[in-house]
């Protein structure tokens, strides 16, 4: 997938105002509309400027695109950085009502998931005044596995897009403190009532929905509620059985390794995953046998004696 420079597509500078973006799009749309322009690539170019306008005319999409777009050149091989949109606020999930299916894979990779639209909703009209509830706002936050395992209070700062009086888009910090519920999982949303967009008239503000994402962990991986760990063991621990110390999100515990264990054997630590008040996660430990390298003659003789006393063909199942 190639990176698309939407400013280049509309022949604009990166500091263009919202009015300049609108004028540039209208000029190119008149020139490239398939009903007017009969060249073979007019329709494709018309779609390209439409996609660029879809992003740049929307302050939220534009600010998110600008956040990392300066690091890429048009045509470069591109893959969205993990959680590239973390900490960034979008109204209604950041998507307009445009049909995203008409856009490129590049657009889809950034803005293609629909999370629903939450536009301001009228509440009532009184004495000529218009009252509308504020927009709901969505953002993604990245937390550690431990935050979910224990539950915690967290202070975070989100980026809120702002359009100044000259039509230029920038971001302003939006600091909030929230409770991370124990056992929350990736993709789950936390709702903060009244933390969204301001309402008009006497209507209340919208809500802020925070989608949870997990930061990569040094030793653990996560699958829904279950924690996974690859545990190195020695050949004698696997062969003879042993009790070894194992890290978990809640601290170190002792794990009994059955004798005769092989690499790939999976053992379960019950309740050591992400558990809420009603749902329970576990930790799965996969054994990896690490064979020490014989350095001295005495060590080599031990391996030779093992080969003599315990002859085996580990490749028997392969037919060799």
Image (spheres, rainbow, N blue to C red):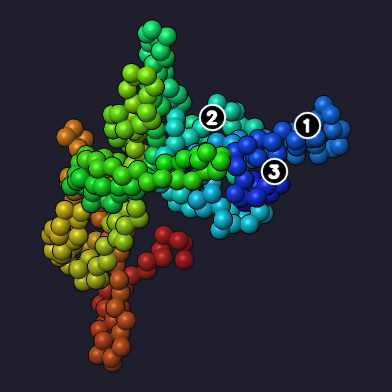
| Quarter holding residue 306 | bottom left
SS for tag 1?
Answer: helix
Q: Disc 1 marks which residue?
A: 30
Earlier along the polypeptide chain: callout 1 or callout 3?
A: 3
Instruction: Report which residue position mark 3 lands on.
Output: 10
| 223, 67: nearer the viewer | 67
State the image quarter where residue 182 is shown. top left
Residue at mark 1 to residue at mark 3: CA–CA distance: 13 Å
Tell me: 86 left or right of 270: right
Secondary element at tag 3: loop
Decide: few, some or many residues near mark 3? Use Cα within 10 Å; few <14, some 14-19, many ≥20. many
Residue 250 screen position, x and y as percent:
16, 53
Q: Which residue lies furthest to the bottom in this view?
A: 297
Q: Which residue is drawn at 21% across and 35% down?
A: 279
Q: Do the residues labelled 3 and 2 touch (CB within 8 Å)?
A: no
Distance from the alpha carbon under mark 3 to that under mark 2 = 20 Å
């Amino acid at each position: 997938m190639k990176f698309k420079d939407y400013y280049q597509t509309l022949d604009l500078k990166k500091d263009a105002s919202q009015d300049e973006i609108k004028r540039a799009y209208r000029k190119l749309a008149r020139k490239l509309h398939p009903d007017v322009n009969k060249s073979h690539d007019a329709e494709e170019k018309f779609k390209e400027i439409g996609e660029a306008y879809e992003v740049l005319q929307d302050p939220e999409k534009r600010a998110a695109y600008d956040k990392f777009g300066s690091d890429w050149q048009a045509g470069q091989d591109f893959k969205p950085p993990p959680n590239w949109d973390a900490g960034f606020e979008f109204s209604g999930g950041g998507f307009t009502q445009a049909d995203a299916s008409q856009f490129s894979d590049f657009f889809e990779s950034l803005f293609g998931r629909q999370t629903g639209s939450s536009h301001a909703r009228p509440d009532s009209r009184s004495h000529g005044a218009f009252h509308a509830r504020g927009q709901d706002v969505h953002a993604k936050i990245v937390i550690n596995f431990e935050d979910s395992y224990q539950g915690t209070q967290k202070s975070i700062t989100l980026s809120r897009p702002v359009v100044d009086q000259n039509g230029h888009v920038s971001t302003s910090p939006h600091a909030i403190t929230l409770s991370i519920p124990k056992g929350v999982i990736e993709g789950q949303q936390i709702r903060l009532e009244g933390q969204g967009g301001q309402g008009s008239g006497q209507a209340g503000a919208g809500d802020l929905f925070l989608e949870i994402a997990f930061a990569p962990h040094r030793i653990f991986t996560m699958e829904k509620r279950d924690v996974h760990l690859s545990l190195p063991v020695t050949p004698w621990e696997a062969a003879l059985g042993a009790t070894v110390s194992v890290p978990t999100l809640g601290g170190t515990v002792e794990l009994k390794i059955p004798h005769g264990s092989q690499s790939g054997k999976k053992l379960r630590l019950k309740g050591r995953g992400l558990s809420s008040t009603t749902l329970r996660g576990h930790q799965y430990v996969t054994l990896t046998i690490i064979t020490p390298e014989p350095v001295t003659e005495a060590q080599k003789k031990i391996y030779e004696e093992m080969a003599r006393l315990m002859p085996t063909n580990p490749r028997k199942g392969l037919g060799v």
